[in-house]
Image (spheres, helix red, strand yellow):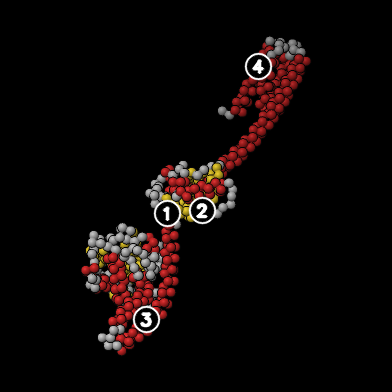
Amino acid sequence: MNTEWTKWILIIILCGISSLLTYYFHGILKTDTVFTHFYYIPIILSAIWWQRKGLIITIILSINLLIGQLLFGPNYISPTDDYFRVMMFISVSVFVIYLSEQIEKSRSALQSQKDHLEVVVQERTKELRQKVDDLFQAREAVIQSESQVRKIIEESPVGIRIIQNDKFVFANTKYVEMFGYRHVNEIIGKPIDILFEPQYADFIKKLNLEKTTGQTLPTAYELRAVKQSGEHFDVAVWLTIIDYHGITSILGFVVDISLEKKMRAQIMQAQKRESIGILAGGIAHKFNNALMVISGSVDLIKTDTSPGHPIHKHINRILDSINQMVNLNNLMLAYARKYQSWPKRSKLNHLIQDTMQQLDKNEIQCSIRTDLTENLPDILADANQMQIIIMAILGNAVEATTKQDTITIRTYHKKIDSKTAGMNPGMVPGDYVILEVEDTGSGMSAETLEHIFEPFYTTHFQGRGLGMAAVYGIIKNHEGWIGVTSQQGRGTVVTIYLPVMS
């Protein structure tokens, strides 16, 4: 049921009771006994519930009381008392209405304040939620950024490490792998001595101390490092100062430059050979002209002397020496790539087989094995110059071997991509037929290997001589490439790349 209707019904009932009491006391009992206290109940309730509108109930009850006075009271009841009671009804009603209105105003003020506070709380809650959301998003962004930075560091092709007090406190995967370790925990907390040669380790410690004390120093260095296996290699290091977990630390970026240094050395050697080739070519031409004059003059002297003449045998010795010098001069011209050649379509396997038939079997102690791939593409080559190449390489291999050793001659076809070519200075990407001569002989030292293609370079090492300089020039003249790998006591491998004929 509606609450308002309930109030009205209750008031009507109370007013009815009040009327009955008035009739009973005034009309039947003929007395003015104070019974009107019951009137205050509907008066107070109506004043509380409806405030000023509640005066209507007060007026109705007052009129009801006065009507009772007129009907029953002239002989028994003093009118003054009823008038006084009416005044009390109205006074009580007005006072209760005043109190009710004040209470309502206070309640309204409290409700307004409550509503205002709720709005403020909602706004503040909304702001706090927004700030929490912003902080959460910022936290997520920081986490994502840290994750991205960590991923970049971990996947970086450059080794990255942090050192505090000469000990490793951080290293990325590349750095760990560069030094031959499997897991970062194998070096974290360890001193830097384990990864560098002693003199370099001391240098780095001194360097770190100077950098952490604020001294201005170079940032890039080339050092000699040591892998877990004990293998030594070259690294480039870039250093800078950072604050890592509140401690001044050394951040280092490390790159393995062993291959780069090797390639630089190869490029310098190639440039050196080019310079020597130019010089050798100039000398060979002048030397060749002089030999032609000497040879012609000696031939004339020989023609003018009889075979029995005492000087005749000396002339033959001079001519033999001239022929030796001509051969040597031809090698110099070949090295300088100025030796006259007549290239034509050729099959490498046939050239090898023809050359091997000319070998003196009596001078060969070791065994020679061939592994020639059939149906190789043709090459554009000068047969005589290719014979010089094969004879020179086989001759050196024979000199470097004993009865227990083996020389293997193999041929095959291979395509070289730009990546492989880039790792071998002077090599051009393309389609190649490859000649490889491998022996299990005494091998060469690193110094001999470095100078193997230089003309007139000699050592006490048995095996490699002047012919390799001519081989280098002839291969270059054929737009090919030659590489030599060797290790003392383990033998040598000479690999020649000859471009396939279009």
Which mark lies nearer to you, 4 or 1? 1
Estimate the spatial distance between the alpha carbons at disc 4 and disc 1, rounded to whole Å: 121 Å
| Percent x, y of residue 261 | 44, 60
Query: In the image, what residue occupies the spot 47% across and 46% down?
Result: 192
**Disc 4 packing (10 Å; few <14; some 14–19; many ≥20):** few
Estimate the spatial distance between the alpha carbons at disc 1 and disc 3, rounded to whole Å: 50 Å
Which mark lies nearer to you, 3 or 2? 3
Estimate the spatial distance between the alpha carbons at disc 4 and disc 3, rounded to whole Å: 164 Å
Question: Is residue 176 placed above or below 307 in the rendered structure?
Answer: above
| Percent x, y of residue 485 | 34, 62
Estimate the spatial distance between the alpha carbons at disc 4 and disc 2, rounded to whole Å: 110 Å
Look at the image and tell me whether residue 51 can be seen: no
Q: Type of residue at label 1? A: Phe
Instruction: Choose the circle earlier in sequence order: 3 or 2.
Output: 2
Instruction: Name the residue that disc number 2 marks.
Output: 238
Front one among 460 and 2: 460
Helix, strand or loop at label 4? It is: helix
Residue 233 tag number:
1
Which mark lies nearer to you, 1 or 3? 3
Question: Is residue 107 placed above or below 346 in the rendered structure?
Answer: above
**Numbered circles on residues, count:** 4
Q: Is residue 317 left or right of residue 15?
A: left
Helix, strand or loop at label 1? It is: strand
Instruction: Choose the circle earlier in sequence order: 4 or 3.
Output: 4
